[in-house]
Amino acid sequence: MWARYSGAMEYDHELDAVGLLCPLPVLKARKRLQGLQPGQVLRVLADDPAAVIDVPHFCAESGHELAGQGDEGAVQVYYIRKV
């Protein structure tokens, strides 16, 4: 289950998907996660309004854990733990 975060969470890699529209943030996250080890966390930054639905759905479908999500101004931040 995901949790809203308040403050910094630890992460291993970051994906800046700001400016990319659906489905690119999820496709790039999927590709980046392939190179990570189980348990590592990918921090994804996005500003596409559809990411609010797409990222949690991607995690549920792929089995990865949505460890947290929140906002930093106009940017949405997602923490995805590779399973």
Image (cartoon, rainbow, N blue to C red):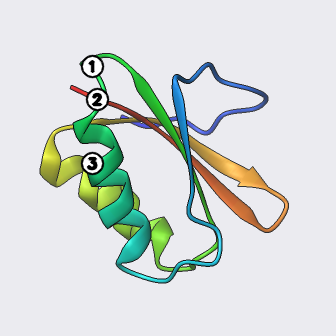
Labels 2 & 1 near each other (Cβ < 8 A): yes
Residues at marks 2 and 1, CA–CA distance in whole angstroms: 7 Å
Rate crowding at label 1 as few (under 14), some (14 to 19) or many (20 or more) other CA atoms within 10 Å: few
Of callouts 3 and 2, the N-terminal one: 3
Looking at the image, is 61 positioned above or below residue 51?
Answer: above
Which residue corresponds to the image point at 27% horizontal and 48% vertical from the top-left?
59
Camera-side mark, 2 or 1: 1
> Seen in the image, is 15 located left or right of residue 70?
left
* Residue placed under numbered mark 2 in the picture: 82
Tag shown at residue 59: 3
Pointers 1 and 3 in contact (C-beta within 8 Å): no
Q: Position of residue 11 (x, y in %)?
A: 56, 24
> Which label sits in the foreground, 3 or 2?
2
Residue type marked 3: Cys
Q: CA distance from mark 3 to mark 2?
A: 9 Å
Q: Amino acid at mark 2?
A: Lys
Q: Nearer the viewer, residue 10 or 33?
A: 33
Kind of residue at badge 1: Gln
Q: Furthest residue to the front?
A: 35
